[in-house]
Amino acid sequence: MRPVIYVLSFIAVLGLGFWAYREHYDTRQALRDVSRLNSEIAGLREALALQRAEWAYLNRPDRLRELAALNFERLGLLPLEPSQFGDTATISYPAVEEFFGDLNNSVMVHGQLNPEEEPL
Amino acid sequence: MTRTPLRPLARILKARAQGENPDVIERENLRLRHEQIRDASRNRAEVRLLVLGLAFFVAFSAIGMRMGLVATTEAAEPRSFASGAEILAQRADITDRNGRVLATNMLTHALYAHPKDMVDPARVAGELAAIFPELNAEDLTRRFTDGRSFMWLRKVLSPEQMQAVHDIGDPGLLFGPREMRLYPNGTLAAHVLGGTSFGAEGVHSAEVIGTAGIERAMDARLRDPALSATPLELSLDLTVQAAVEEILDAGITMMNAKGGAAIIMDVKTGEVVSMASLPAFDPNNRPNPVLPKDAEPGDSPLFNRAVQGVYELGSTFKIFATAQAMELGMVGPDTLVDANAPMQWGRHRIREFQNKNYGPLATVTDVIVKSSNVGTARLALQIGGLRQQAFLKSLGFFDPTPIELTEAPGAKPLLPARWPDIVTITTSYGHGMSASPLHLAAAYATIANGGITVKPTLLKQAGPQPGVRVMREEVADASVEMLRQVVTRGTASMAEVEGYEVAGKTGTADKPKRTGGYYKDKVINTFASVFPASDPKYVVLVTLDEPVETSGTEPRRTAGWTAVPVAAEITRRIAPLLGIRPSVEAPPVDTLTAVRN
């Protein structure tokens, strides 16, 4: 019985050693991946910050004002004026569409209605 | 192991034959056997002790070696954590109230040299001088060859310059990463933002520290690593700020002024929506603060007129005298007061503008509407110097403004050392004591806020701040109504902006000479206004430095002709941007609709 236990435990030690070896290298690989991803994230964040700065720079009011002036003929942009505030009361109601306006395949009906019948 | 019997038959028989006791032999053998057993177990115990000791030794030496290793190796950052944005930016961004970027960081590089590693210092010096015009080739060659092993060349490089330096290809030229502060909007809100510079510098990084404005006042907050990912939200509105600066700049040009300032402030929260001071500077490239000796401090573009420009503010102060008189119950808006000009006080003679006379009697409203010096002087004398000082103090005129700018604590109002009656008189119409436009804006905001003090701030607020009531609401409302009449039928008729019920007061003050006395032809014109008068929301304050309006036959220097039209244009432009609808008169009720049942 004893030798069997010895052999089994020896095999177990071997197996565990092999497992630990594998785990060790897997962990190192995972750490390498994480640090690569981190530096990639840092690079992307840096690019994002730069693009945000560029966006702010390209949208600075001075430049927008000049662009609006340059493209006035095409866009007709003017500063916001108090007179541009509207009131819902001044907007006319949309025209009511005629109910049978777009009826096609119409059917001609001949005959007379019975005046005593209840109208539909 | 052979086992010896305890009673070997041969010895027993022999002992019996000789008449000896055979038990002695047995005891002897038993003793020997016990000794053998004892020796064996001692050996085993010794071996066990040895193994145990070895195990302890290995364990302790493993711990010891690990400790030694941890102690002697450099600390490494844990690599398995996800990196956040806070690791990247060492200084928080600054945004306006709508999240538009006012200041951010950009990664760039600094250039430094290891002259001892240089292959050809003379060639490097020549090529560097060709890239950077401010560097001198001979000077560089001398410094490269004088035996030093390290020197800084440039604090920041553009990517093109970096590539050009890279192309020199000398191993002695090295780059260090730098985080640079960037103000994408250029000169916009320059005085509020201030600027930054590098503090302690190393090869791998450098501190960015604020040098002026909110960058310096809020330096600790901006550099706090825990908050570096959350931008600092200001109360400024970028669009409003741009519109105000544009109009103010045009106004300064049209009115031939030296400079000017404008403040837009929310009367409920004290938020400064826009603060402009012109001429301005570019915070990306902050100019040198040193001025020639004979120049006034106000001549520097770094000077923030809105906060640091401490001047006598003229007739804009009159409303405080009438408001206090009403608060004390002495007068009402329609009470007649003595306004007979000129008024003699000791050896001083108090006159009106262009020696007019609005008296002998005028209502308190008319004193404000026509801007009568004598009328306010009489009221101030009734109030008395002590109470006048207490009231002005409660409005914040005796202390620096609490705004979050590094310049603010230095801009203390200038007060006369003593407060005799003549100071009481002159202060009532804004002469004798000086304050900044921001002080005035805060005081007008207090009136417009129903008499509750408002603390000016540049940080976005969640809601109205708690304040102290310094006058009754009826008094504040009546004061705003008086200011409204200044616009409808008084000195500020040009301030009328249809639909916005502007209420305000003009002020023209002569500029003091450095040597004492006043300039005859140099004035500071101020227009302080609130709108809309029926429910005040914003204070608009415009100050022009040395303006003169030359469209008429003779130059005009009163605020009504200079600061007022500029303020009106600002109000017209910003009110829609701030989302305030022009109030239109209610359309007449349709009679047909009215009678329908």
Image (tube, coloured by chain):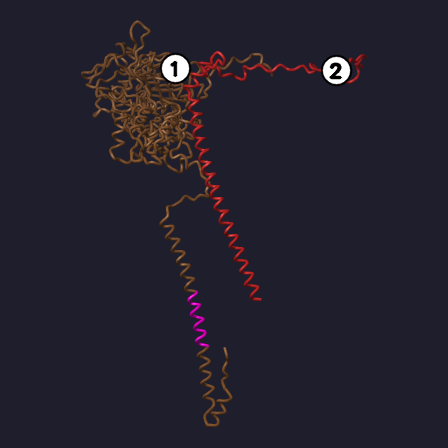
The residue sitting at 29% across, 6% down in the picture is B554
The residue sitting at 41% across, 28% down in the picture is B95
Q: To which residue does mark 2 refer?
A: A105
In the rendered structure, the colour chosen for chain A is red
Residue B45 colored in magenta in the image: yes
Q: Chain of mark 1?
A: B
Query: Dot 1: what SS?
Result: helix
The disc placed on residue B302 is none
Question: What's under tag 1, amino acid-wise?
Answer: Ala
Range of residues picked out in magenta: B37-51
Query: Dot 2: what SS?
Result: loop
In the rendered structure, the colour chosen for chain B is brown
> Closer to us: mark 2 or mark 1?
2
Identify which residue, B256 or B139, lies in the foreground: B139
Toward which corner of the image does residue B376 lie, by quadrant? top left
Q: To which residue does mark 1 refer?
A: B568
